[in-house]
Amino acid sequence: LDQYVLTPGGPDAGKPFMPTMEQARFIVWWYAVDEHGRWLYRSGTLRRLKGWGKDPLAGALSLVELCGPVEFSHFDAEGNPVGKPKYDPWVQIAAVSQDQTRNTFTLFSSLVSPQLKEEHGIELHKTIVYDRRGKMIEGVTSSPLALEGKRPTFIIQNETQWWVEANDGKAMADVIDGNVTKSAYGTCRSLSICNAHIPGQDSVGEADWEAYLEVQAGQAVD
């Protein structure tokens, strides 16, 4: 990762991307597999304060999903899982407005290192990133019908504390959940990133938080 993804801002801008210990722990669990090499988690929520670094981390993970060895290949002699690049990666960064997707896409020009750009033929555009094969990271906004039946391999659901019925956020979340559920062999996973929700707005972020509390209380199965 340190050769291909750079820190997009702050005092270490331009240096190799180094996640914090909390971010690293999250990444390790997000890519955890069971004894059969299957994902432990097919969906998740990263809920943290503003300034924690959710968008840079989401951008870094999107680039790794596009170009990196994130698909299980085999276990080595020591029993450690070994990855391989996805054959047909398709990454989506979903939001209820173009401004939200722009929060992540404006970071790509700083996240992508010259080595990553050269080796993988990365082309950067306003709301889409291509690699040499024509595989992509694309920004999508609240159009549930346009998402229906799509077969992405990784979806970032951006700022789900603002995803409500009025802006089609809840419908979009339902479609994404359906795409993840029906994907063969767990080929599609989704990760929501959000700040704390405003109670009573009935947002996707609020629903995810309430589901988490139910699991913690033993009232639901994770």
Image (spheres, rainbow, N blue to C red):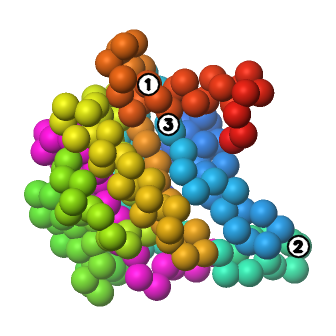
What's the distance in space between the residues labelled 1 and 3, CA to CA?
Answer: 13 Å
Q: Are marks 1 and 2 in contact (CB under 8 Å)?
A: no
Q: Quadrant of residue 22?
A: top right
- Residue depth check, mark 1 versus mark 2: number of the one nearer the observer: 1
| Rendered image: mark on residue 46 | 3
Counting residues from the start of the chain, the first of labels 1 and 3 encountered is 3
x%, y% of residue 67?
42, 73
x%, y% of residue 75?
79, 77
Amino acid carrying mark 2 in the image: Glu
Counting residues from the start of the chain, the first of labels 3 and 2 encountered is 3
Q: Residue at x 20, y 63 (%)?
A: 146
Q: Residue at x 88, y 73 (%)?
A: 78
**Left or right: 73 in relation to 42:** right
Amino acid carrying mark 1 in the image: Glu
- Residue depth check, mark 3 versus mark 2: number of the one nearer the observer: 3
Q: Residue at x 30, y 45 (%)?
A: 171
| Rendered image: mark on residue 100 | none
60 above or below 23?
below
x%, y% of residue 206?
44, 25
**Which of 189/68 is in front?**
189
User: In the rendered image, is residue 51 in sight?
Assistant: no
| Rendered image: mark on residue 78 | 2
196 above or below 142?
above
| Rendered image: mark on residue 206 | 1
x%, y% of residue 212?
61, 29
Q: Please, what secondary structure does the residue beneath circle 2 have?
A: loop
User: In the rendered image, is residue 162 in sight?
Assistant: yes
Q: Residue 116: within the magenta?
A: no
Q: Residue at x 77, y 27 (%)?
A: 218
Counting residues from the start of the chain, the first of labels 1 and 2 encountered is 2
Region of the chain picked out in magenta, as a range = 83-110
Amino acid carrying mark 3 in the image: Leu
